[in-house]
Image: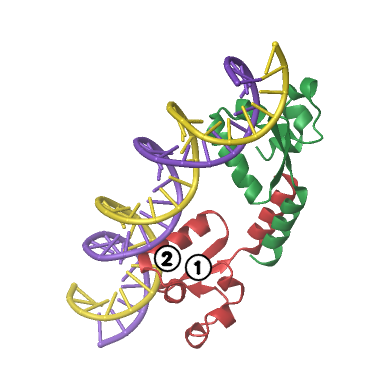
Chain colours: A red, B green, C yellow, D purple
Amino acid sequence: MLEWLKEPEINFPEQLQHAGFEHGVCVGQIQAKAGLTQSTVSEYLSILQRAGFIESTRVGQWTYYKRNESAFEALSKLIQSNL
Amino acid sequence: MLEWLKEPEINFPEQLQHAGFEHGVCVGQIQAKAGLTQSTVSEYLSILQRAGFIESTRVGQWTYYKRNESAFEALSKLIQSNL
DNA sequence: CAAATATATCGACTTTTCCCGATATACCAA
DNA sequence: TTGGTATATCGGGAAAAGTCGATATATTTG
């Protein structure tokens, strides 16, 4: 999922028509692609969010998730320096 | 454990008298510091070895483990570029 | 407000991981 | 070769993570 969210235009072409990608990708799109149930995907995304890897934006009935690149940078540096 | 192996002199002073650190630290020393059973530590180290993060050298009845820094570099870069 | 849609949360079940004791293997010393 | 020490492997029970269906919450539309 994290890799998918790197290139929303390529991985979620469906969404382009309904909304842009400025807030990220909505749960339903990710769920469809993942092939897991709605509840599983929702929980998974919320875990990633708590961990800081993605950010959510609620727009109407949709919740959009997008990557927080700085968290990946930080993880990469953490491995370099602390691990 | 991976952090401990970054500075063997500091984290495993006991071993200094018996052997140097050129081959790393032996399982017994790591086990004592970890506070886990011998079997658990042995298995854990072998997993880290299979994953490429540490290397082992057998010297007599002892197996010494030391870090493989290039694996950490690679992981850090992988997160930067692929994730 | 009622129905429809999108997402979040809950409880239960399954799968995986963690950790242990027991035992096997390898090496050394007498 | 026998006994002692260090490590590895095996089998099983406990803990954690993954996944689901059912249900709750939030929002939009009529």
Q: Amino acid at mark 1?
A: Thr
Residue occupying the point 40% across, 69% down: A36
- Badge 2 local density, few (<14 within 10 Å), some, or many (20+)? some
Q: Nearer the viewer, mark 2 or mark 1?
A: 2
Q: Is residue A36 above or below residue B47?
A: below
Residue occupying the point 61% across, 76% down: A7
Chain bearing tag 1 is: A
Q: Are marks 2 and 1 in contact (CB under 8 Å)?
A: no
Q: Which disc, if any, is residue A57? A: 1
Closer to us: A43 or C14: C14
Give the x, y percent position of residue A75: 66, 54
**Count of residue discs:** 2
Give the x, y percent position of residue B43: 56, 40
Where is the C terminus of chain A found, in terms of image quarters? top right
Circle 2: element type: helix
Q: Which residue is mark 2?
A: A41
The image quarter in which residue A67 lies: bottom right
Circle 1: element type: strand
Closer to us: B36 or C5: B36
Q: On the rendered structure, is A21 left or right of A76?
A: left
Q: Is residue D27 above or below residue B27?
A: below
The image quarter in which residue D22 lies: bottom left
Q: On the rendered structure, is A39 left or right of A63?
A: left
**Is disc 1 on the same chain as disc 2?**
yes
Q: Amino acid at mark 2?
A: Val
Residue occupying the point 68% across, 51% down: B52
Mark closest to the chain's N terminus, 2 or 1: 2
Chain bearing tag 2 is: A
Q: Which disc, if any, is residue A34? A: none
Closer to us: A55 or B36: B36
